Image (cartoon, rainbow, N blue to C red):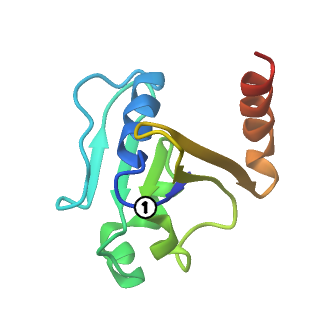
Amino acid sequence: MVALVGPLGSGKTCFVQGLARGLGVSGYVRSPTFILLHEYRGPVPLYHLDFYRLTPSDADELGLEEIIEGTGVTAIEWAEHAEGVLPSEYLRVEFAFGEGESDRLLQVSARGDRYRPIVEDVAECVFSR
């Protein structure tokens, strides 16, 4: 479960495109703004949701709980709108604009013990350069 938080145009969908590539998903990953949920098949399924216009009751209709508990990876854009329906443990990625036009700042944090090793791996990768 990856919760993506940040302003419009900050790179949330681009991040999911890279996540999909890393999971072995082929094909184009697009923003789920109007479709609300995209499912991408690969060695590890990817479920891509957008909570910009959704409410917690919409999450029930989409079967969010079943998706999150499944075998794939769930990425939710505008996750700050989904706080009431997110599981107790997830990876949170916050996006912000940097100084340059194409610069982005990301803050990765773990909510719960399950995701702490991922944050540690990312920090090691970034700071070992």
Q: Position of residue 4 (x, y in %)?
A: 50, 55
- Depth order, front residue of 5/35: 5
Residue for point 23% across, 25% down: 27
Work out whether 45 lies above or below 113. Answer: above
Residue for point 25% across, 61% down: 36
- Depth order, front residue of 113/120: 120
Within 10 Å of the Cα at label 1, are there few (<14), some (14-19), or many (20+) other Cα atoms? few
| Quadrant housing residue 84 | bottom right
| Quadrant housing residue 92 | bottom right
Q: Is residue 3 visible?
A: yes
Q: How many marks?
A: 1
Work out whether 39 lies above or below 45. Answer: below
Residue at the farthest front position: 99
**Image quadrant occupied by the C terminus:** top right
Residue for point 31% across, 68% down: 62
Callout 1: SS: loop
Q: Position of residue 66 (x, y in %)?
A: 45, 61
Residue that mark 1 sits on: 7
Work out whether 59 lies above or below 40. Answer: below
- Left or right: where does residue 98 sit relative to residue 61? right
Q: Position of residue 20 (x, y in %)?
A: 40, 31
- Left or right: where does residue 114 sit relative to residue 14? right
Residue at the farthest top position: 129
Amino acid carrying mark 1 in the image? Pro
Q: Position of residue 64 (x, y in %)?
A: 42, 65
Residue for point 42% across, 81% down: 56
Work out whether 82 lies above or below 103. Answer: below
Q: Is residue 2 visible?
A: no
Residue at the farthest left position: 34
